[in-house]
Image (cartoon, rainbow, N blue to C red):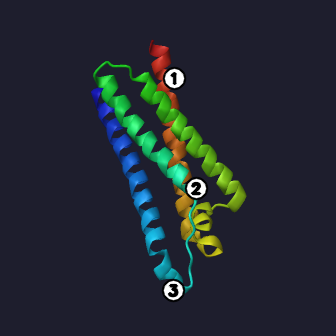
Amino acid sequence: MRTALYLLLLLGVFCAAIGIVMALAYGLFLYVAPIFKDAFGLSFHTSRWFFFVVLLTISSGLCTSFYSLAKANDDNYMIFLSFALISNGFSLAVQLFRMIVHGFAWIGVELAGKSGDIRAVQLLSMGFLVFTLLNFVLCLSILREEKLSR
């Protein structure tokens, strides 16, 4: 049982790290956007949807980590697991909605306009969707198991 908690802690840290790296990359793109516009004619746009997904990813990772720590200490751990599930669910819903609106390369289209609709960004967006889906299913199955064991 302790091994599962350690793995969940690592998953939470990994998920939060992905979110932080995405937030830093977003900030860097916005910071260097004038340079790219002058040099290459590319413009980057702000995206509230992308930033919302990044914040949900960070909160999901933190809540998953706090769940494993609270479970190990026999504290009130269900609240953290519930928040992780809600964060993953909202993130999944937003990603699916933006994919319906902009296509599979929604991240690139949101940030760079039509020039962001390339194959690499499509694969990145679909990979991130699969990661969020797996995280959601994992949190849902853990929550179900916790409810059954009570």
Q: Residue furthest bottom?
A: 39
Q: Which residue is painted at 63% across and 71% down in the image?
A: 113
Tell me the quarter of the image containing the C terminus.
top left
Amino acid under disc 1: Arg
Q: Who is closer to the viewer here, 139 or 70?
A: 70
Of the two numbered discs 1 and 2 in the rendering, the one whose residue sits closer to the viewer: 2
| Element at label 3 | helix
Residue under label 1, please give it: 144
User: Closer to the N terminus: mark 1 or mark 2?
Assistant: 2
The Cα–Cα distance between marks 1 and 2, rounded to whole angstroms, is 32 Å
Residue 41, given in percent of the width and then of the height, sits at 56, 85
Q: Which residue is painted at 46% across and 69% down in the image?
A: 29
Label 2, residues with CA under 10 Å away: few <14, some 14-19, many ≥20: few
Residue 48's tag is 2
Residue 123, given in percent of the width and then of the height, sits at 55, 63
Label 3, residues with CA under 10 Å away: few <14, some 14-19, many ≥20: few
Residue under label 3, please give it: 38
User: Closer to the N terminus: mark 1 or mark 3?
Assistant: 3
Disc 1 + disc 2, Cβ < 8 Å: no
Residue 57, given in percent of the width and then of the height, sits at 47, 46
| Element at label 1 | helix
Amino acid under disc 2: Arg
Residue 77's place in the image compared with 38, above or below, is: above
The Cα–Cα distance between marks 2 and 3, rounded to whole angstroms, is 24 Å
Residue 46's place in the image compared with 141, above or below, is: below
Q: Which residue is painted at 52% across and 54% down in the image?
A: 51
Amino acid under disc 3: Asp
